[in-house]
C-alpha cells in the first residue's frame, strides 16, 4: 500500500512534465495568448520545480518526511485544480508555478521512502518499480495529453490529477510512517538563494534562448550573467561554510554517487530530447495526426516496463555495470536507427526503435540508481535523492534546448547548401520533373520549391541531432567503470552500510 500510494504521486508529477506539451495550441486559443506567451505554461513549471528540488532534503529533515510529502501532494493537487479552471494566461502561469513548487519534492521523497521500506537485497526491485513511474510519466505524457485534448478539453490535462492526488494523499496519510526527523542546523538562506537564482536563471536561459535568439538578446545575456555570478557565490560559500552550508559536501565524497549523477544527467538528456524531437518530426514533416503520433511513440513506454521488470531481478546476480552498459548499448542502437530515418519510413519504422530505446532506458535506470545509492549513508539519502532528481531535470532542460538550437541552426545551414544546387542551369536541365511538381513561372510555385528544400533541410537536421545523441551515448560507456561494485553472496544486492564501511 505504501508503494502504491507513493507511486501514484510519482507518476502524477512526472506525467505533468510533458502532458501539457501537445495541448499548448489549444490553451493559446482558449486563453487568448500568443504561441510565444503560452510557452510560459511549461517554463514556469520547470523553473519552479528546479528551484524547489534542492531544498527537499532540508525540509524533510527539519519537519519530517511524511509531513512534507502530504503538503506536497495536497498542494500539487490543489494547484492542478487551479490550472484546470484558469481563465487567463496570468492565472495558469501562477498555478503552474505553484504546481512546480509543490511537486518538486514528490519524486525525491518517493525514492527515499522506497529505499527505506525495503531491505538492501530488495533495493533493485524497489527501484525497478519506482523507475517505472519516473520514466513512464514523461514518455506517456504526450499520448495521454493528446487523447484528453482531442476527446474532452485541454483543461482535463490538469483536472485528471484530482482523483490521483486524493488517492495518493489518503494512502500516504494512512500507511506511511513518519521517519525520525534529524534536527538540522539553521537554514542556510544565502546558500539556498544563490543556488535557486543560479538554477532559475539557467532554466530561463535554456528555455527562452532559442525564442529570443540566444546571446543576440539582452534578456538572455542578463540571465547568463546572473547564473554565472550566483553559481560562483554558491560554490565559494559552500566551500568556506563547512557544516553550516546548505549543500552537504559529504555527497561529493562518494564516487558512486557523483558518477551516478553524471549518468542520470545524460539519461535525462537522452530521454527528454528524444521526446521533444520525435513529435514535431512526425507531425510537421511526415504529416502524422496527434493520435497517430502518440500511438507510434507509445512502444517506448512498453519497452521501459518490460526491461525494468527484468533489470530488477538481474541486479545482484549480474554486475550492475554490465546491465547499465547493455542499456546504453540498446539506447545507442535505437538512436542509430533513428539517424537512418528517411521521408518514406512507415509507422513500424518509428515504433520499433522507440521500443528498443525503451528497453535501453529500463536496463539503465534500475541498476544505475541502485549503484548510485549503494554506498551512500542512509542519513544522506533525502538530500541525495533531491540532487539526483535535480541532475535529471537539468539534463533534460539542457538536452531539449541544445538539440532544438542545433536543429534550427543545422536546418538553416542545410537549406543554404541545398539551395546552392537549385540554379538556373538546374532548372533548365530538369524542366519536366520540376514543372510537374511546381509551376516555377509563378511566385506560388517558387515558394513551394523553397518549402520542399526547407523540409528536406529540416529532416537532415533531425538526423544530425539523433546522430549526436548516439555518439554521446557511446562515448559515455567507458566511464561506467568509475563506479565501484561489491560482490554479495547468494545473489543478494550489496548492503549499503557494509559497502560504506568498507
Image: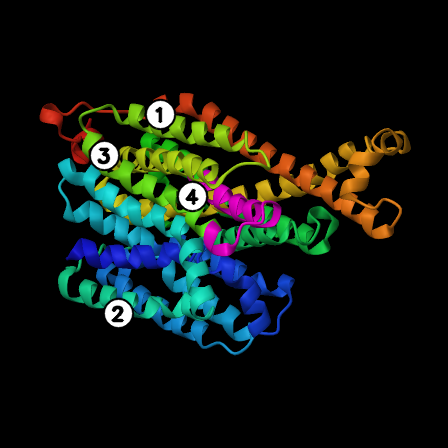
Q: CA distance from mark 4 to mark 3?
A: 25 Å
Residue at which label 2 appears: 166
CA neighbours of label 3 inside 10 A, class few (<14), some (14 to 19), many (20+)? some
Foreground mark, 4 or 1, reads 1
In the image, what residue occupies the spot 76% across and 33% down? 418
CA neighbours of label 4 inside 10 A, class few (<14), some (14 to 19), many (20+)? many
Decide which of 427, 491 is in the foreground and name it: 427
Along the horizontal axis of the image, is 333 left or right of 493? right
- Residue 183 shows up from this direction: no
Foreground mark, 2 or 4, reads 2
Q: Magenta stretch: give its range.
A: 267-292
CA neighbours of label 2 inside 10 A, class few (<14), some (14 to 19), many (20+)? some
Which of the numbered marks, if any, corresponds to residue 446? none
CA neighbours of label 1 inside 10 A, class few (<14), some (14 to 19), many (20+)? many
Asked if disc 4 and disc 3 are in contact, CB closer than 8 Å, the reply is no
Foreground mark, 3 or 1, reads 3
Residue at which label 3 appears: 310
Quadrant of image for the C terminus: top left
Residue at which label 4 appears: 391
Please report whichever mark, 3 or 1, sits nearer to the chain's N-terminal start: 3
Residue at which label 1 appears: 325
Task: Name the secondary structure under disc 1.
Answer: helix
Amino acid at each position: 500500500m505504501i508503494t502504491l500510494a507513493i507511486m501514484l504521486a510519482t507518476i502524477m508529477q512526472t506525467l505533468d512534465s510533458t502532458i501539457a506539451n501537445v495541448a499548448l495550441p489549444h490553451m493559446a486559443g482558449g486563453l487568448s495568448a500568443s504561441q510565444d506567451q503560452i510557452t510560459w505554461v511549461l517554463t514556469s513549471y520547470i523553473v519552479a520545480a528546479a528551484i524547489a528540488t534542492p531544498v527537499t532534503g532540508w525540509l524533510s529533515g527539519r519537519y519530517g518526511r511524511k509531513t512534507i510529502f502530504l503538503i506536497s501532494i495536497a498542494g500539487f493537487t490543489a494547484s492542478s485544480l487551479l490550472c484546470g479552471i484558469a481563465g487567463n494566461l496570468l492565472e495558469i502561469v501562477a498555478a503552474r508555478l505553484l504546481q512546480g513548487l509543490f511537486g518538486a519534492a514528490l519524486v525525491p521523497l518517493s525514492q527515499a521512502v522506497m529505499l527505506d521500506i525495503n531491505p538492501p537485497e530488495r533495493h533493485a526491485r524497489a527501484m525497478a518499480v519506482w523507475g517505472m513511474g519516473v520514466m513512464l510519466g514523461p514518455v506517456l505524457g504526450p499520448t495521454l495529453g493528446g487523447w484528453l485534448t482531442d476527446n474532452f478539453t485541454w483543461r482535463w490535462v490538469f483536472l485528471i490529477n484530482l482523483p490521483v492526488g486524493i488517492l495518493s494523499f489518503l494512502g500516504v496519510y494512512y500507511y506511511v510512517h513518519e521517519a525520525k526527523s534529524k534536527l538540522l542546523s539553521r537554514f542556510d538562506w544565502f546558500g539556498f538563494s544563490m543556488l535557486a537564482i543560479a538554477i532559475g536563471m539557467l532554466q530561463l536561459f535554456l528555455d527562452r534562448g532559442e525564442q529570443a535568439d540566444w546571446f543576440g538578446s539582452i534578456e538572455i545575456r542578463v540571465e547568463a550573467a546572473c547564473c554565472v555570478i550566483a553559481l560562483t557565490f554558491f560554490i565559494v560559500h559552500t566551500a568556506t561554510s563547512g557544516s553550516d552550508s546548505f549543500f552537504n559536501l559529504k555527497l561529493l565524497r562518494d564516487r558512486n554517487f557523483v558518477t551516478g549523477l553524471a549518468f542520470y544527467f545524460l539519461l535525462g538528456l537522452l530521454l527528454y530530447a528524444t521526446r521533444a524531437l520525435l513529435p514535431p518530426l512526425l507531425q510537421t514533416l511526415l504529416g502524422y495526426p496527434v493520435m497517430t503520433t502518440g500511438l507510434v511513440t507509445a512502444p517506448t513506454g512498453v519497452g521501459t516496463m518490460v526491461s525494468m521488470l527484468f533489470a530488477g531481478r538481474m541486479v545482484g546476480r549480474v554486475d550492475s555495470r554490465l546491465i547499465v552498459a547493455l542499456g546504453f548499448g540498446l539506447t545507442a542502437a535505437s538512436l542509430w536507427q533513428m539517424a537512418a530515418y528517411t521521408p518514406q519510413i512507415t509507422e513500424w519504422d518509428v515504433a520499433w526503435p522507440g521500443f528498443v530505446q525503451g528497453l535501453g532506458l529500463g536496463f539503465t535506470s534500475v541498476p544505475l540508481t541502485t549503484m548510485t545509492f549503494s554506498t551512500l549513508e542512509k542519513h544522506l539519502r533525502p538530500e541525495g535523492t533531491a540532487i539526483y532528481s535535480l541532475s535529471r531535470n537539468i539534463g533534460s532542460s539542457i538536452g531539449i534546448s541544445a538539440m532544438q538550437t542545433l536543429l534550427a541552426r543545422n536546418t538553416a545551414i542545410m537549406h543554404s547548401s541545398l539551395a546552392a544546387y537549385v540554379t538556373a542551369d538546374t532548372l533548365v536541365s530538369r524542366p519536366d520533373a520540376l514543372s510537374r511538381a511546381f509551376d516555377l513561372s509563378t511566385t506560388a510555385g517558387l515558394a513551394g520549391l523553397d518549402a520542399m528544400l526547407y523540409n528536406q533541410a529540416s529532416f537532415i537536421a533531425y538526423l544530425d541531432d539523433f546522430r549526436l545523441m548516439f555518439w554521446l551515448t557511446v562515448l559515455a560507456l567507458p566511464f561506467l567503470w568509475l563506479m565501484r561494485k561489491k560482490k554479495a553472496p547468494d545473489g543478494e544486492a550489496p548492503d549499503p552500510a557494509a559497502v560504506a564501511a568498507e
